[in-house]
Image: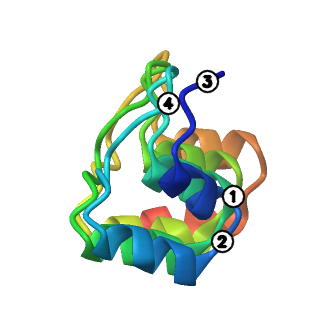
Amino acid sequence: KRGDTPLLFAAQNGHLECLEVLIEARMSIDAARDDGVTPLFIASQTGDSHCVRMLLNAGAEVNRPAKSGRTPIFTAAYHGRRACVRELKKAGADCSVCIQGRTPLDIARENGKSDCVAELES
């Protein structure tokens, strides 16, 4: 219904072996659902840093926003996914992206995600 793909499903559920097979089969790494959510975005949201790393290594676009305007690092900070924030930062994620005047750091602070605050400030 939403435009889910096998790659999105594998990323959402942390199925690394499936993800690897789908990447090797050259599935579109940045194919998005109807709401613009990509496999990297969903892995960042669910907190699977291994999936995040695999997708980044396969060439996923680190700063690609969903239709909401949120990027993977924004959603990782919102959900308190420190390891994902770290992987995304290493890959060059834009930590200054603003949604309604708030950055990922602002969102992490507002939601009491002190681990992510520390990671974003480092």
Which sits earlier in the primary sequence, circle 2 or circle 3? 3
Name the residue beneath numbered marker 1. 46
Which sits earlier in the primary sequence, circle 3 or circle 4? 3
Is 60 on the left or on the right of 115, as rendered? left
Q: Nearer the viewer, residue 112 or 90?
A: 90
Is 114 on the left or on the right of 90, as rendered? right
Amino acid type at image mark 4: Arg
Query: How many discs mark residues in the rendered view?
Result: 4
Please tell me the numbered disc located at residue 33: 4
Q: Nearer the viewer, residue 110 or 89?
A: 89
Please tell me the numbered disc located at residue 14: 2
Question: Would you say the residues marked 3 and 4 are in contact, meaning their CB atoms lie under 8 Å apart?
Answer: yes
Q: How far apart are the alpha carbons under marks 4 and 1? A: 16 Å
Asked if one can make out residue 122 in the rendered structure from this viewpoint, the answer is no
Name the residue beneath numbered marker 3. 2
What's the residue at 62%, 53% (across, down)?
9
* Crowd rating for badge 3 (residues with CA inside 10 Å; few <14, some 14–19, many 20+): few
Question: Would you say the residues marked 2 and 3 are in contact, meaning their CB atoms lie under 8 Å apart?
Answer: no
Amino acid type at image mark 1: Thr
- x and y percent of residue 64 in the render? 30, 39
Front of the two marks 2 and 3: 3
Q: How far apart are the alpha carbons under marks 2 and 1? A: 9 Å
Residue 10 to residue 101: above or below = below
Front of the two marks 4 and 1: 4
Question: Would you say the residues marked 2 and 1 are in contact, meaning their CB atoms lie under 8 Å apart?
Answer: yes
Q: Nearer the viewer, residue 88 or 117?
A: 88
